[in-house]
């Protein structure tokens, strides 16, 4: 059974693994090997940034039999910053459930419009939840170029 719960400090290493696994398991459906390997390594290459984002944001964890299998982070209050699901648990509606949880919290905090930076892989999940494309952009990290989609959803 899947249950959403608050992030615990002891979850950090699990979230790093979820991030890495999600990208490695699903990333090649839209990205090159070089892009996938760099993206998957983010929690390790930029450990302080990842840790700060997870710890200072509103982070929710989806657990299966009390083991973390997915997570989402709201940071700042109007930005869904992270949404990752273990590859073995993808396609079960988990991302949508976490999105709904984050949207509800953002709305509770008075946010009228929630934004996210979607990947090629996550864009359909957000579109199904009513997010609209604001802008497509190319970003570069360590000489590796990525396409991302700035999306937003009105919450009121």
Image: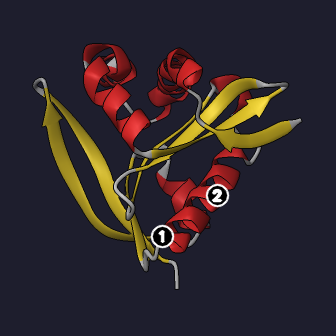
Secondary structure found at label 1: loop
Nearest to the observer: residue 80 or residue 152 = 80
Spot occupied by residue 109 in the image (x, y as percentages of width and height): 48, 70
Left or right, 117 with reference to 122: left
Residue 63 figure quarter: top right
Q: Name the residue under label 1.
A: 109
Residue 101 sits above or below residue 38 on the image: below
From the top left corner, tell me how far across and down residue 67 is, in percent. 74, 22
Residue 91 located left or right of residue 19: right
For label 1, count other residues whose C-alpha is less than 10 Å away and answer few (under 14), some (14-19) or many (20+). few
Point out the frontmost of discs 1 and 2.
1
Which residue in the structure is indicated by mark 2? Answer: 101
Disc 2 packing (10 Å; few <14; some 14–19; many ≥20): some
Q: Residue, x 30% and y 49% (percent of image)?
A: 148
Q: In this view, does 72 lie to the left or right of 134?
A: right
Residue under the image location 59 percent in, 29 percent down: 8
Q: What percent of the width, then of the height, locates residue 78?
A: 38, 64
Question: Which mark, by number, is residue 132?
Answer: none
Among all residues in the image, which is located at the extreme bottom?
Answer: 156
Q: In which quarter of the image is residue 102?
A: bottom right
Cβ atoms at labels 1 and 2 below 8 Å apart: no
Query: Is residue 64 placed above or below 139 in the rendered structure?
Result: above
Q: Is mark 2 on a helix, strand or loop?
A: helix
Q: Which quadrant of the rendered structure holds the N terminus?
A: top right
| Number of numbered callouts drawn | 2
Q: Residue at x 64, y 57 (%)?
A: 101
In this rendering, is residue 5 above or below 114? above
């Amino acid at each position: 059974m899947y249950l959403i719960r608050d992030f615990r400090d002891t979850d950090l290493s699990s979230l790093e693994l979820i991030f890495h696994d999600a990208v490695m398991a699903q990333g090649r459906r839209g990205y090159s090997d070089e892009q996938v390997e760099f993206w998957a390594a983010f929690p390790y290459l930029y450990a302080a940034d990842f840790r700060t984002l997870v710890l200072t944001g509103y982070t929710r964890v989806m657990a299966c039999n009390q083991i973390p299998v997915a997570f989402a982070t709201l940071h700042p209050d109007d930005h869904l910053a992270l949404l990752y699901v273990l590859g073995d648990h993808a396609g079960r509606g988990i991302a949508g459930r976490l999105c709904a949880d984050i949207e509800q919290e953002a709305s509770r905090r008075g946010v009228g419009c929630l934004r996210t930076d979607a990947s090629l892989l996550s864009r359909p999940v957000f579109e199904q939840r009513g997010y609209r494309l604001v802008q497509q952009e190319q970003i570069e990290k360590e000489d590796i170029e990525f396409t991302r989609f700035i999306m937003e959803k009105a919450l009121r």
